[in-house]
Structures are given as C-alpha cells and as structure tokens.
Amino acid sequence: MRRVHPRGEALGVAISEFSPAFIEAFNAGAAQFQAGRFEEAIATFRRLIDERPDLANLHGNLGLCLRSAGRTDEALEALRQALRLRPDYPDALNAFANILLDRRQLDHALLAYKELVRLRPDYPGALLMLGNAFMFIGDGERARAAYRLSILVEPHEATNYNNLGAVSLSLGRPPEAACHYRRALTIDVGKPEYRKNLGTCLLMAGDYPNGTIAYEGRLEQPVWRKRNMPGTLWQGQPLEGRTLLVHFEQGLGDSFQFIRYATVLKGMGARVVYECQPVLKRVLSTAPDLDGLVAFGEPLPAYDYQVSLMSLMHRLGTTPDKVPGGVPYLRAEPELAADWKDRLDRLDGDEPAALRIGINWHGNETGKSIPLECFEAMGRLPGVRLYSLQKVSGLNHLERLRDRVRVTELGAGFDAGPDAFLDTAAVMANMDLIVTCDTSVCHLAGAMGRPVWVVLKWFADWRWMRDRLDSPWYPTMRLFRQASPGDWAEAMARVTADVTALAARTASAHTASAIAAAGVPQP
C-alpha cells in the first residue's frame, strides 16, 4: 500500500482534486496498515470512502486492510467494489485472487489470476500464483508453463525456481527438479525449505548419499516439529558404552519404518532408548535391541547423545543397497493373534475363505486414498474374502457401499483402545495378504514381514522412489503405481488381476493338499 506522492499515483487521480486534510488522512491510513494497526487503518479508509465513494483505490486499500485483519468476507466485498469502479486495478485483482485461492475457490481464483497476468504480466508474483492455482487443480503441465514464465519475468526470485522444481518432480522429472532446486539455493543460499525439497527429490531418484544430507534441511524449517532436545547431538561419535536417545519426528509409519535402526546402533555398542508417540509404545515394544522405550511426555532417562529418528538415514550412510534388514522386526502379541484367529474363524462361519485379504483404502493425506469401489471386483472373486483394517476415517464409505463391496467388518472394538495398531497387527498376522494405500498400515505390515501390496498415487512419497515395483525397505512388499495421475481404477484392475492369479494358485494348492491328506494317488 503506497502513500500519496506529488503526482497522486496512490489515489489513481490527480492530486489537485483533494484537500491537504484528505491526503494527510490517506497517508495516515497507509502508515497504520504498514505498522500492522489494521483496525485503525480500516476505520480511516471507511471515513475516506464516506467522503469519496467513487475512488477505487480507497476500496482497494480497505480490502487489503480487511484481509490482513482476517475479515475476508468484508475484504472480498471491498475488493469487488474496487474492481467495479476500476476493472484494470492490479493490486485489487491480486488481493481478490489470493483470497479466492486461500478459500479453494479455484475456478474463480484462476480467472482472476489469468486476468491479472493479461493486464500486467510483470506484476510481482502474478505468474507464480497462477502456477500455484494450476497446481491446486492438478494441472501440472500448465503450472510448469506458468512457473517457467515467472522465471523469465522475475529471474532472481528463488521461489519461482523452487515451485518449478516441485511441479517438475510431480510430473516425474527428478533430474530437472533437482536443477531447479539447486538454482533456488544459489539465490537463497541454504534456505531450509529448499534444502529439504532437494533432499526429497534426490531420495526419490535413489541418490541417498546426497539426498539424506540435503533432507536434513527439514530440521531447520519453522513448520517442522523441532524438539530442541537438550544434550549433545549425535553426529557419528563413537557409541561404545554410551546411551543414545532417538526421538520420533514425523508420522506413525515413520516409527514403524525406522525403528529397525536400533539394531544397527546396538551393534555399534550403544544403549538405545527410543522416545515414541504414546499410542505406539505397546506395539513397538516387540522391536529388538531397544534398551528403553519411552512415550512422549514421560520422563526421559539420562543419555549421552540424542538424534532425530529420520536423521539416522544420513548418520548411518543408508543407500538403497544398504538398507538395514532384520524383517520381521515387529510382531503381533501372540495371545492377541490367537484370539483374532478364533474370531476370524467365527466370522467366516461355515464358508472359510481360501484367501484372506486385509484392506485399508483411506489415508489422511491428499490423493493417497483408494476409492472403496475399486475393491468391488476383488471382493467377488471365488474363495477370496476381504477384511476391513480401516479405522476412523473412511468408514463412512463402507456404509455407503455396503451393498456393492463385500467387506467383512471387525467390529466397533477393533483397535478402539488407547494403544494403536495392536488389533491391526494381530489381524494382519492372520491374513494371507494385505492390500493398502500408502498409510502407516503398509509400514506395519512390511515391518512384520507380512505379504503386502501397496497401491500408490502417481506422485508418491520419496521413500518409494520413482519406478520400482518393490521396496528395499520391505522384502515382502510389492508396489502398484498409478499409470496416470488419479487413475485408481487402472491400478486396482492390475491388483485384482494378480489377486485372481494368487487365488487360483491357492485353490490349486489346497486341492493338492486335500488329495494328499486323503491318500489318493496323484498322477
């Protein structure tokens, strides 16, 4: 927001039209806005609008103040009035588009950004925000084109290169993305967000030596869960006879995936203590080589060094060819697994399934969930029975599709206690196969050494890399990737075809076993 200068640009008309008192009030409103005194600025510009309601810039400035004060409904109306009075008003159009994008009114935001770019292609950030809007609607190619133009207009803005890197990666071009991330880092040297983004890009491409180093940038991001743990950070110092506190950092699945490093650290002579998410304390208690398991919020024991769980990839030199093994390193509790075996047998009744498949279709992150409808054909295969491993989110899909998709539900008490995944682990121990989207369930199944097929969205997480159909982290896992963005039907058709073949082999093996048990000679 600009103050009035001698030529009167901030008002959009000749300065001679206004009294000194009016100009003084306008500049006071601008100063109040710049000082963050938004309510005072709002009152000032409302008074000025009462005097001159025909001035678009007054309504525009009021809209900016209202948006900054969090009063977005009022801001939109003020900006609309500014644009009615002056359709070619770029500042108002930009603020209007930004509010629409924040509200995910994407079609209208796109129209506003396109008009802004038409009026002023060199307006700061206009092409960048147009690219962002295209990203929100999943149009990566148009987003890429917009970001490339933004670099031509603003070649020294690091964000332009960072966002071009992001869309290039989402389009399956990791080498191109890495170049853009590196360029962003030459402009804004060492920025944690760009380092982390470069790290995920390199990890996705399988370049773990460089990727794990760059991925450490995440720990300096303000949005990250930074612990500021007391004590000395472990950076590779000798561990013989020392206590190392490893603390969780991100999701539940990450704890399942990386708890394996306790065995590596134990082999280096450390006494290993892991601070975990409270809901995982019991299910993680089966992990080997832990000298202590502490839930977040419980008193910590004395320790010599501390390190974040996700940093162990870097500190221990992990590569796709040198992933610590030991699978299975998590197990179901034996009594609970036996109890669930009996319960599943009772659920099956007089028609035991030849192939029991546990399914998990809904994840909390955008784009990871498989439509439950995609399991319909699988549930109708002869000898196949599906069992829901879904908890909380996604259960409404069962209610809606119960007549179409044959899924055995495990009851309201399934994993309803304070300790998460105990029932899930016990049920999976009794499954022949688990088919799941990319959630913590797939990591638990993989850590237990259960046969697990993971169906991935087109732009999957870095840990699954780009083109592999297996995972170096889990030897019993297969990956099924979308052939094109959003196409779950095609991916699940491949999964169903392979389940069909597996069911046929299982039925053949059961027949052979029955014949052998009956003592019938075989040809």
Image: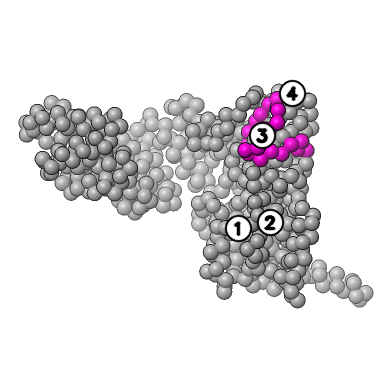
Is the residue 401 above or below the residue 230 in the image? below
Tell me which residue sits at (56%, 38%) in the image: 200
Q: Position of residue 108 (x, y in %)?
A: 31, 52
Q: Are marks 2 and 1 in contact (CB under 8 Å)?
A: yes
Which region is colored magenta? 289-312
Hey, what amino acid is under mark 3? Pro
Residues at marks 2 and 3, CA–CA distance in whole angstroms: 29 Å
- Can you tell which mark lies on residue 424? 2
Mark 2 vs 3, N-terminal side? 3
Q: Is residue 332 left or right of residue 492?
A: right
Name the residue type under label 2.
Answer: Thr
Identified by mark 1, the residue type is Lys
Q: Nearer the viewer, mark 1 or mark 4?
A: 1
Of mark 3 and mark 1, the one earlier in the sequence is 3
Whether residue 338 can be seen here: yes
Residue matched to label 3: 299
Q: Are marks 3 and 1 in contact (CB under 8 Å)?
A: no
Q: Do callouts 2 and 3 mark residues in contact (Cβ within 8 Å)?
A: no
Residue at x-position 72% and y-position 59%? 427
Asked whether residue 483 is in view, the answer is no
Above or below, 437 against 43 in this view is below
Residue with the mark numbered 4: 238
What's the residue type where badge 4 is placed? Pro
Task: Give the total of numbered labels.
Answer: 4
Colour convention of the picture: one colour
Query: What whole-number distance in Å separates the C-alpha atoms at marks 1 and 4?
Result: 43 Å
